[in-house]
Image (cartoon, rainbow, N blue to C red):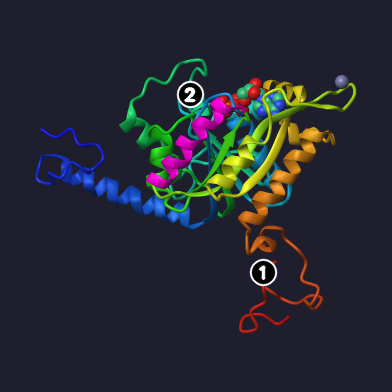
Amino acid sequence: MSTCSSGTCGSKKASGCGSADAAVAQQNTAIAASLDRIKNKILVMSGKGGVGKSTVSVNLALGLAQKGYKVGLMDVDLHGPDIVRMLGMPGRMDGELTKDGKMPPLQYNDTLKVISLESMMENRDDPIIWRGPLKNQAIRQFIADVNWGDLDYLVIDAPPGTGDEPMTVAHTIKDAKALVVTTPQNIALADVRKSINFCKHVSMKILGIVENMSGFICPHCDKTVDIFKTGGGEQLATEFSVPFLGRIPVDPRVVVAGDDGKPYLSSGTTSPAVQAFEAFLAKVEKELPVHAAAASIPMANPLAKAGSSCGCGGGPCNPNTCDC
Ligand SMILES: Nc1ncnc2c1ncn2[C@@H]1O[C@H](COP(=O)(O)OP(=O)(O)O)[C@@H](O)[C@H]1O
Ligand SMILES: [Mg+2]
Ligand SMILES: [Zn+2]
């Protein structure tokens, strides 16, 4: 009897394992095909819970989407998925499968696709009681079976720590880069070291560190109060020679936005926290440029002759196939 569910038991002759191997190989092919169409993959992680990973994930994904990039947001915090609530998306994923048998993700707007286990559940308040192999399989299916299409960025929101979910992402998405979120106090910074060492262990590159809840800007007098201290994230970035991506202050409106399902960056305000998010976004864009970004924003080709049959879309013109 074989209990191998991953095709890695090593006993290919054991009954049922050959077909399991074939299924895994088929899934690996589907995963590779999906990932091939995604230019940048960002795993948002931290050593601790409650430091703002989901808030950063949602606002990073939304901010990039608002700039015209094609973005996917994948919630792999399987036990505590928050993404769809933060985005105010109560709908269930029950769209028809696409021609190639893939699941359509939820669509927040034209440029932002979202997937979360929560939107597949009958009752959102039911707990997920899964161990490692099932979680591994769910994440693999999120990549293999979902119709992500062409994306400039895939933002992946992880649970705290260095358990099954980030491990599966590291093994499955070899070119994912870690975005480590921390708060400034020493106790949180000690956990960041663990995240950084985890990345070294699984050979995952680090996109950078962002320090969230870094200072509180008083809405009455605009003075900054460093409730949790400040600057520790930057020191750590220097110590580990990884980019420091910025500080985001505490702003009570971030909490209200998360609770109301109206993401902060969609609020249209220009508060210091919004400005900090914008600066952070710009750094991420700089660290992970999308070389063909122009292709994601359809633009008229000024050189095209009126009425020409240019089939090159917004990309560079191919003189062999078009008459512009
Ligand atoms: N910069 C911030 N200012 C104020 N509240 C914040 C900020 N970042 C996150 N929060 C709030 O802190 C809580 C935890 O954030 P969350 O993103 O869920 O953390 P995590 O995903 O790391 O567990 C949420 O209520 C969120 O709205
Ligand atoms: Mg979270
Ligand atoms: Zn004040």
Rendered location of residue 25, percent (x, y):
28, 51
Residue where numbered disc 1 is placed: 315
**Going 81% across and 73% down the picture, which residue do you hit?**
302
- Expressed as whole percent of the image width and height from the top left, the position of residue 143 reads 45, 44
Q: Residue at x 35, y 36 (%)?
A: 137
Q: Any magenta on residue 252?
A: no
Residue with the mark numbered 2: 121
How packed mark 2 is, by other alpha carbons closer than 10 Å (few <14, some 14-19, many 20 or more), is: some
Q: Is residue 193 magenta?
A: yes
The dominant secondary structure in magenta is helix
In-image side of 76 versus 111 (left or right): left
N-terminal-most mark, 2 or 1: 2
Highlighted range, magenta: 185-201
Q: From the Cβ of disc 2, is ligand 2 less than 8 Å away?
A: no
Please rate how many residues cluster around mark 1, counting C-alpha atoms within 10 Å: few if below 14, some from 14 to 19, many from 20.
some
Task: Out of 292 and 120, give the one closest to the viewer.
Answer: 292
Residue 91 in sight:
no
Q: Quadrant of the C terminus?
A: bottom right
Q: Please name whichever residue, 90 or 272, is drawn nearer the observer in this view of the structure.
A: 272
Q: Secondary structure at mark 2?
A: loop
Q: Quadrant of the N terminus?
A: top left
Q: In the image, what residue type sits under mark 1?
A: Gly
Q: Position of residue 243 (x, y in %)?
A: 60, 49
Mark 1 residue element: loop
